[in-house]
Amino acid sequence: MTEFGIGTYMRNVVRTLARLDRESKYFLIGSLAKVAECGPLPPNFHAVALEGRDNTVKGNLDFRAIVRRLHCDVVHIPHLFWIPRGLPCPYVLTVHDLLEHMYASRDASSLRRSLHFHLTRRALSHAARVLAVSHFTKSEIERIFGIPDERIEVVYNAIDERFLRGHATQADRDLIAQRYLVNYPFILYAGAIRPHKNVVRIIEAFSALKTELEKEGQFPDLKLIVIGDDLSSHPRLRRTVVRSGVQNDVRFLGFVPIEVLRIFYDVAKIFVFPSLYEGFGLPPLEAMAHGTPVVASNNSSLPEVTGNAALLVNPENVFEIQRALQRALLDPALRTRMKQRGYEQAQRFSWTSSVGRILEIYREVAGNDVSRGVAAD
């Protein structure tokens, strides 16, 4: 499990299940080190080591053997897969997005794309229940794979509880000033750096914003901070920074732990997230939980997730992104309104509510007699 993505999902599902259900038996199959990241768990939770990854043929066969040996009633597979499983009991499948069938597949051969598509559709068709993390993702599963509406249920993600620990203290601000040398106003992006995340246009919009602010004599020391990867791995971003003339104003900090990320969310002037595609999109909600104004895309799941609390923009229009950043930065009344709406929007998503529904689904799938559940790593 990592700090982001499916790792965050599994940690929060497991921790919440541990709080809600002390009777059913749960087997957490996977890396013992990753299971340990869930923290202390009650005695009805058991870690079972799986050597290697479950998306290889050997890992898949080992996984199947473990499920059979444990006589499991239901398996929860927390991510979309395509290698056939052949499990001896029903499984519930969580779909976070269909990115592999939209962007990554373009680089594969037509034969591989076709095989990937048909085996993925088979995995979805054979699931006892498909959990989509948003209505947008549900509609994509129906549209692309033809899975019937009644087989798919929307169960929202929510933010990690560590983002709910109040505002940054002076000690927190001192920490990022000393460790990261950040003691100036900044706009923040946090998340993976992949083509669909649209970081190139963030840099271009920030450059245009700096030009406009300079005309008005506003925020001369404003920076853009990108958290989530190292610049050296992305030569196109380096070229964009140089071409846009903002070498001294854009910083790539790489990975930071959640305890530090929450400080950056809290201190940022604006959080910007003009992604081209999101199955759910947690980072905008994480920023809203800290009262930070958000500029996000008007596409995919992001309007559903951000509600009326963000400024939504066409992610392919650099100047629309720039104008929204300028409004969110310079309009005090708008900032106050966005701050309050952001708090309210973040509170609409709850792991207790979502995992409570997942638990009900386990029981429905197993015929109301779940004696053994599995969270697959």
Image (cartoon, helix red, strand yellow):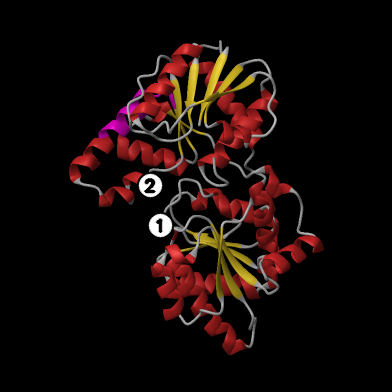
Residue 70 x, y percent position in the rendering? 51, 13
Q: Which residue is mark 2?
A: 99
Total marks drawn? 2
Relative to 77, 177 lies left or right? right
Which badge, 2 or 1, comes first in the chain's sequence? 2
Q: CA distance from mark 2 to mark 1?
A: 9 Å
Q: Is residue 127 magenta?
A: yes
Q: Amino acid at mark 2?
A: Leu
Q: Amino acid at mark 1?
A: His
Residues in magenta, as a range: 118-129
The quadrant of the rendering that contains the N terminus is: top right
Residue 229 x, y percent position in the rendering? 50, 59
Res 319 seen here:
no
Q: Which residue is mark 1?
A: 196
Q: Nearer the viewer, residue 184 or 41?
A: 41
Res 118 seen here:
yes
Q: Residue at x 49, y 41 (%)?
A: 134
Relative to 194, 267 lies left or right? right
Residues under numbered marks 2 and 1 in contact, where contact means CB atoms less than 8 Å apart: yes
Q: Which type of secondary structure does the marked residue at label 2 adopt?
A: helix
Residue found at the far front of this picture: 51
Q: Main secondary structure of the magenta part?
A: helix
Q: Residues within 10 Å of mark 2 (few under 14, many from 20)?
A: few
State whether residue 103 is above or below residue 65: below
Residue 24 x, y percent position in the rendering? 62, 16
Q: Nearer the viewer, residue 319 or 235?
A: 235
Q: Is residue 39 magenta?
A: no
